[in-house]
Image: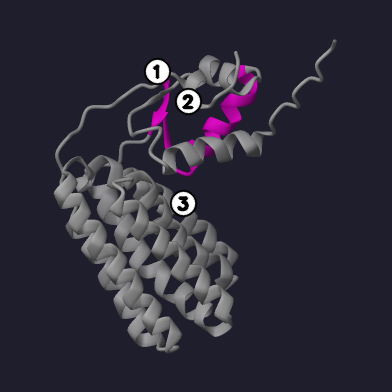
Amino acid sequence: MSTAPVPALSDTEIYERIVSAILDHRLQPGTKLVEDKLGAAFGVSRTRIRPVLVRLANEQIVTMTPNRGACVAQPTEQEAREVFEARRLVEPPLLERFMAVATAEDIAALARFITEEEGARASGDTRHAIRMSGDFHLAIAERAGQQTLGRILRELVSRTSLILMTWGPVALSASSARAGACGCLEHRAVLDAIRLRDGEAASRLMREHLSHLEAQLQFEPAAATNPDLVELFGQVA
């Protein structure tokens, strides 16, 4: 009895799976991304993996070093500061565009992201909570319809996830819980301003929220981990 071959993943699908693993913090900053192992994990040749890693490097999600290969980026303190500065510039105009076109369903979708984030934090699932927090911001950008700023924000959100994993207070459960509760409340405050169509208040609250996230960063080095890439991506070599 023959078994039908499993269709190979496209480069975009491989890219999205690696990005999802980074955003979900299953791949932590500093993790080595060995081309042969990734090829085995996704059932493709290493020549298919390299362009994906180059794309991730161009987006500053991955660092590629000659003769040493690729690893998940480890943002410096300066890079972290720059990312939050850029987000404070990019997100208010996206927020204003969102409010100009948002329907009741769009606003309800934002509320669901917040509720899911709150549930994840209550259960101690910090990874999923940070993912939902990022999705709250990306949903605003996507509905705003400004593709260029939307692409920029997607990169910034990915880098923010790395920053929070590297420098955020996630190692301390009590501190992380308090920080997460504040983040959810700040999202709800932004959402309230959106419901009122108060662009000035929503933009101010968004900037304050991002500044608060930045203020929580703790710039002390953490040890990197190196998971089994084949096992992580659930493929048979």
Which mark sits nearer the N-terminus, 2 or 3? Answer: 3
- Marks 2 and 3, how far apart in space? 23 Å
Per the rendered image, the range of residues in magenta is 46-72
Say whether residue 61 is visible: no
Label 3 neighbour load within 10 Å: few <14, some 14-19, many 20+? some
Q: Residue furthest right?
A: 1
Query: Which amino acid does the dot numbered 1 rest on?
Result: Arg
Q: Which residue is mark 3?
A: 155
The local secondary structure at tag 2 comes to helix
Q: Are the residues tagged 2 and 3 within 8 Å (C-beta)?
A: no
| Percent x, y of residue 195 | 44, 84
| Percent x, y of residue 125 | 33, 45
- What residue is shown at x 41% (from left), y 51% (from top)? 131
Q: Quadrant of residue 50?
A: top right
Asked if residue 68 lies in the magenta stretch, the reply is yes
- Image quarter (top left, top right, bottom left or bottom right) of the N terminus: top right
> Is residue 90 found left or right of 74 in the rendered image?
right
145 is higher (above) or lower (below) than 65: below
Front residue of 84 and 25: 25
Q: Which residue is mark 2?
A: 232
Q: Which residue is mark 1?
A: 68
Asked if residue 57 lies in the magenta stretch, the reply is yes
187 is higher (above) or lower (below) than 82: below
Query: Which amino acid does the dot numbered 3 rest on?
Result: Glu
